[in-house]
Amino acid sequence: MTVGRAAALRRLGAAVVLGVIAAFGQAPYEFPIVLLVALTALMLLFAKTVRPRQAALVGWGFGTGYFMHSMVWIVSPFLVDAPRHGWMAPFALVFLSAGLALFWGGAFAFSRKLSANGWPLILCWPAVELLRAYVLTGFPWGMFSQSLVEVMAGQALAWVGPYALTLWLIAAAVVLGLPGQRTARTRGVQAALALVTGALLVLPPRAVIAPMTDHHVRLIQPNAAQRDKWNPDMIPVFFNRQLGFTSAGPAEGMPPPDLIIWSETAIPWSLDLAGTALEEISAAAQGVPVLMGVQRRSDTRYFNSAAVLGKRGEVQQVYDKHHLVPFGEYMPLGNLMANFGIHGLASREGNGYSAGPGAKLLDLGEIGRALPLICYEAVFAHDVAAAPERPAFLIQMTNDAWFGKGPGPLQHLAQARMRAIEQGLPMARVANTGVSAMIDPWGRITAMLPLNQAGYLDAVLPAPRRATPYSRSGDMPVALLLLLSIMLLIIRKHRRDSD
């Protein structure tokens, strides 16, 4: 083995280790200061690369280690039906992590190509993170800003959004970690930057008393394990459990709820075949509107939907999930794949679920108009921003039983809190196995049911804040900044190479 190849392998190994360490910034650990330290150390490895290929390997190795640690929960869906899908679990983790890391490897390679000093990474890395949210329907899970919901820095989501915060973290790591001319002045700037950034990553948000409305919402958490959810012997157990939680009297000192919410796919029957079950649900609710997750069939198409039930079990409004999980709720080339026995984990046969037409508000009477988000849709800031008008509050209905009992559900909760901060809106979050919670417009949990516990929660609905700057602008400002800046760097390099 040549000296150069040995050095490259050592850098790759070190990058993987740093990626694993960086993932301690995400739930369930939530140490964003560790993330920053790992990013800063990564810059020292990046500085030792000369060619774009070497830089790509460092970025890819870091990403692979980071995603394999932070997204280890991805094996859980494959273990629900282990005899059928279990063999896929390790491949899913490795290939997904290595595939997502290709974005980061590309950013490192392009940065090295643009400049020998590596500073373009400040622009290139956030740019590929933005692309990661859209390419092949997008998968922005695990972005660095996701680690900030518990600290002061996370409140900036309301002003600049998740990708600008990611840019800030990367810029801080580059300034602190990349070598340059070391003078007393630059060392002083670095020390000040480290102090301020560290404080923002450690200190909790400023205490703000969230104004409350006069409305109350009941969240129903049946805690149906995914392996039991469709078991014929367990179906009546979970259904009756939810009926019991729905009909229970209000919590001590609280009035009856104004709205009752069941989780994603809360009943095993499609909406058209639910029969008297809908009447039983409304009867248990005693006149209170019920919003429930349910599968819906239209001719030969199936939808993952949310339905509002009236007093007699009549379906008053329906929302169809429009951002589906690839390989989970639908299979690309599904009919072809079905011929080989390959189906989406949560989908119907063949192509699986169909996508709904888009974001839609539900009119829930005096409590206001709400934007429903079914499971995966709360991962995407731009899906929330796609609402046809500003809602009074957000609702996430999810079945996080797919994610197991580890970090997956907690990371999904962190993303729900991000959406609340970004929009300045409260969110009622209902999860089959938890965590169900009421979240205020600052992303704080005002009431919750713990993970893997059956129960119901009566919670006061917080009042919304005024529309945040990010809710008005979305990602367009940061996208334009990144695009124009990178174009200027490309032009500058072209001119320099031509001289």
Image (tube, rainbow, N blue to C red):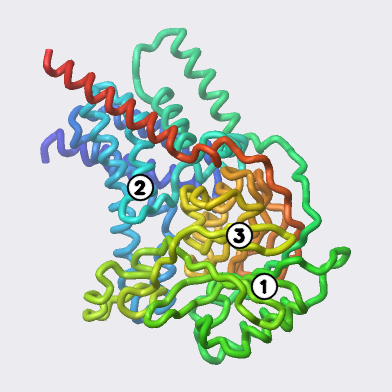
Q: Quadrant of the C terminus?
A: top left
304 on left or right of 234: left
Q: Secondary structure at mark 2?
A: helix
Label 1 neighbourhood size at 10 Å, few (<14), some (14-19), many (20+)? Answer: many
Q: Is residue 401 left or right of residue 137?
A: right
Give the label, 3 or 2, closer to the camera.
3
Q: Who's the residue at 41% across and 50% down the image?
A: 140
**Residue in front for this viewpoint, 412 or 84:** 412
Return the residue at label 3.
Answer: 395
The vertical placement of 234 against 223, above or below, is below
2 or 1: mark nearer the eye: 1
The residue carrying mark 1 is 290
Marker disc for residue 132: 2
Cα–Cα gap, marks 2 and 1: 36 Å
Q: Tag 1's secondary structure?
A: strand
| Residue 228 visible within the image | no
Q: Amino acid at mark 2?
A: Arg
Where is residue 70 drawn, in percent x and y?
A: 44, 52
Residue at 56% x, 47% y is 418
Tell me the quarter of the picture where residue 434 sits. bottom right
